[in-house]
Amino acid sequence: MNRDFFRTRAAEVTAMSGIAASQAGFAVMHLTQAHDVDPVAIPVSAYAVTWPGVLLFPLSVIALAATCFILAMRGVGLAREGFVRFLLGATAVMLVCAAVFRTGTPESGLTWWAQIHRYSAGAAFVLLTVVAGICAARMRHADAPAWVRHGTWWATVLAALTFLTTTVNTFLPGVLDGGDWRGIPQRVLLVVLSSLLWFLVANSIRAAVPVPVEEPVRVPVLAGVRS
């Protein structure tokens, strides 16, 4: 695959379109499936078992995966970012798995494909949270716009808090009756991490713009003038 493609304007537009398409897809699912999925108590993955989420859910997740893959190939505009790019590539793989293997239903229970979906989606959230933390730390000493630095920092804090809450609500649903409202932190986490990708794409585009180099001013030497 030609790596130069990932540094083109087309790749930038594709990365931004992936985030926008994903956010739009999840917004449509929330609006059209409100009578089937309770956003307070039911996880986001439940949209995948009824229409139009059967189609929109995997497409929205794969759109995010595409953005992660492009960032993994082109970088996020930071020095020594090899590990970050590796994590973004791994996130893309986990998101594809979460899209291909859908969650279970009350009738099917926690099947093997539902477990693959659960743990791959959880792994993607963990990896993106780690990416956010690393980038937030390194952007403090990088030439990144203030809004990108601050946004990445807030995304790190919110992602860590909401992921911890989601984990407790999933595996210990009796704690503070978290199982009754576990859908809320999941949706917050989804918004935060998709916003993180906006910041990373923006910084990647900023770093890809060449900085003009000023040529030295040449002073003409008049003929016949000796030093």
Image (cartoon, helix red, strand yellow):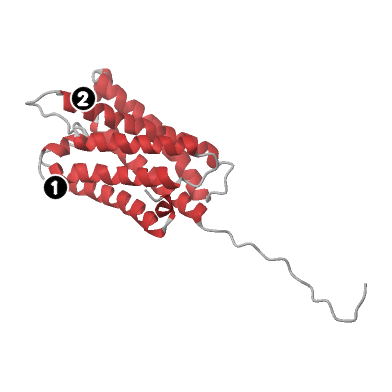
Q: Which mark is residue 80?
A: none
Q: Position of residue 205 (x, y in %)?
A: 46, 54
Looking at marks 2 and 1 on the same chain, the residue that comes earlier in the sequence is marked by 1
Q: Toward the viewer: 93 or 60?
A: 93
Do we see residue 159 in this rendering? no
Q: How many marks?
A: 2
Q: Is the residue 105 above or below the residue 222 in the image?
A: above
Is residue 133 found left or right of 49 in the rendered image?
Answer: right
Q: Is residue 216 above or below residue 189?
A: below
Badge 2 is on which residue? 115
At a point 38% along the width and 30% down the height, the residue shown is 161
Q: Quadrant of residue 121?
A: top left
Q: Which residue is mark 1?
A: 32
C-alpha span from label 2 to label 1: 26 Å
Q: Which of the pair 133/178 is nearer the observer?
A: 133
Find residue 128 and report its image quarter: top left
